[in-house]
Amino acid sequence: MRSVMGSKKLMLSSKASLPFKTANKDKRQSLHIKQKRARDSIKRDERFRRKREEDRDPRLKEDRLKRNIPLTLDRKRVWDEVDENITDGLGLSVNIERLKRQRVEEDAADPIKAAVPADIEKDPEEEGSDLDSMLDSASEDEGAEENERSKKPRKGSQRRDPTERATSPSGSMASTNLDLTPESLAAKFPTLFSADPPPVPKVLVTTSINSTLHTEANLLTTLFPHSVYIPRSAHRYGHKFSMQEISSFATNRKYTAVVVLREDLKKPTGIDFVHLPQGPTFHFSISNWVEGRKLPGHGNPTNHLPELILNNFRTPLGLLTAHLFRTLFPPQPDLQGRQVVTLHNQRDYIFLRRHRYVFREKRTTEKSVVGPDGKEVKGAEGIRAGLQELGPRLTMKLRRVDKGIQRGRPGEVEWEWKGGMEKQRTKFQL
């Protein structure tokens, strides 16, 4: 028996691992270390070999960077197919900007529409329907073609690379265009989408009944300009005012919005925005609340009116949410204060940050500013921007939109988050 086992030839792999598993723990650890060192050595040799080749031919690096595009959930984002029955589109994941662009390209490609003189007046009803409609006339044909292509089997060499599989370009850092709001959505919420200049915002900040979040509520008054905090009664015999009564009180005193901070276990867990005088009401959940004094290297905010940045709100529901935040900040900021409030939407999570910025000269050890294409931005070769976070820092997620002021009845709930909406990880609501 020993001669048979001794006659077997043990083949060592290229990663210095034996062809069998040993029961000895110390030997397993040493084999794992040898395997990891060999694997790291192979990767390091490959990396240095690629670097030598790219130094000889810089075009190899450019081609590699073009192919090496990470396939994230944002790049795999899918959109709903639209039809003629669309009204406001709150429950649909529709890219308004892309649909508008496709309609303009179709009108430019149609020789009959292109030949019509611009001075011919259109019927106002037809013109409004064109602006309001979110229907893509070629979406059905394109969808049918995509279904036919998906049914055909692909060979291994014909599989799409990550760049081709990405259904939409990465627009997570794109600024939100508030001019693309559908007219049906504007007609449903006329107070948010008024053509008149918005009034100077005046915000009333309060909390839930018997709340302990007085410090956090006072921090919100430094975030929203022209805001004041009024605590709700905590006395056992005090009158517990409802949201309808608080909103009526605020409307009579020329407030434009009411912000209600909700808590659980003495921590902020939600925030409600009531747009006065008649709504709508937005309910958000809060996570990752961090006060400014707990941030490393934080600064102290001043009384200057901040600038507002809204990023990546692309669907009708996202535009509605962006218009809500726009009404909370004055349209004319104080630029000398150099303060900016950023509301960045990423996978239906809204990240709120407040910074103070400064423009300075680029140091010799710093790299130049590059754009999305990886090339240096012209005109900003010697300029860099420094940021100092002021706080507070929090993450919000939209849970419900009510048409009125208080929690709406089943017929008054415009949109509500449900667990099944996240079953498809590549589909987002905002």
Image (cartoon, helix red, strand yellow):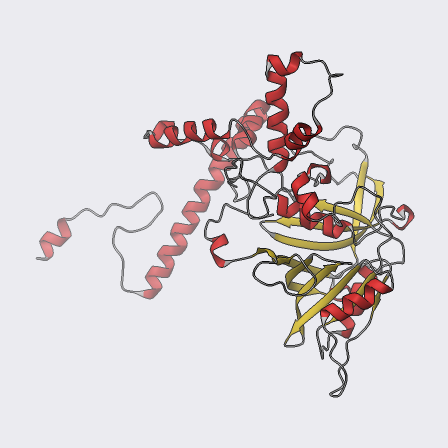
Tell me if residue 424 can be seen: yes
- In this view of the protein, which residue sits in the foreground, 84 or 344? 84
Above or below for 217 versus 7: below
Where residue 58 sits: x, y (%)? 59, 24
Where residue 346 sits: x, y (%)? 61, 49
Left or right: 430 as drawn, with respect to 337: left
Tell me if residue 216 can be seen: no
Above or below for 52 versus 79: above
Q: Give the quadrant of residue 33.
A: bottom left
> In the rendered picture of this protein, how many numbered marks are placed on residues?
0
Q: Which residue lies furthest to the bottom in this view?
A: 237
Where residue 209 sits: x, y (%)? 71, 77
Which residue: 37% across, 28% down?
148
Left or right: 54 as drawn, with respect to 27: right
Which residue: 59% across, 63% down?
409
- In this view of the protein, which residue sits in the foreground, 45 or 192? 192
Q: In which quarter of the image is the N terminus?
A: bottom left
Q: Give the quadrant of residue 127.
A: top right
- In this view of the protein, which residue sits in the foreground, 373 or 13? 373
Q: Which residue lies furthest to the right in this view?
A: 336
Where residue 427 sits: x, y (%)? 51, 46
Q: Residue furthest left?
A: 1
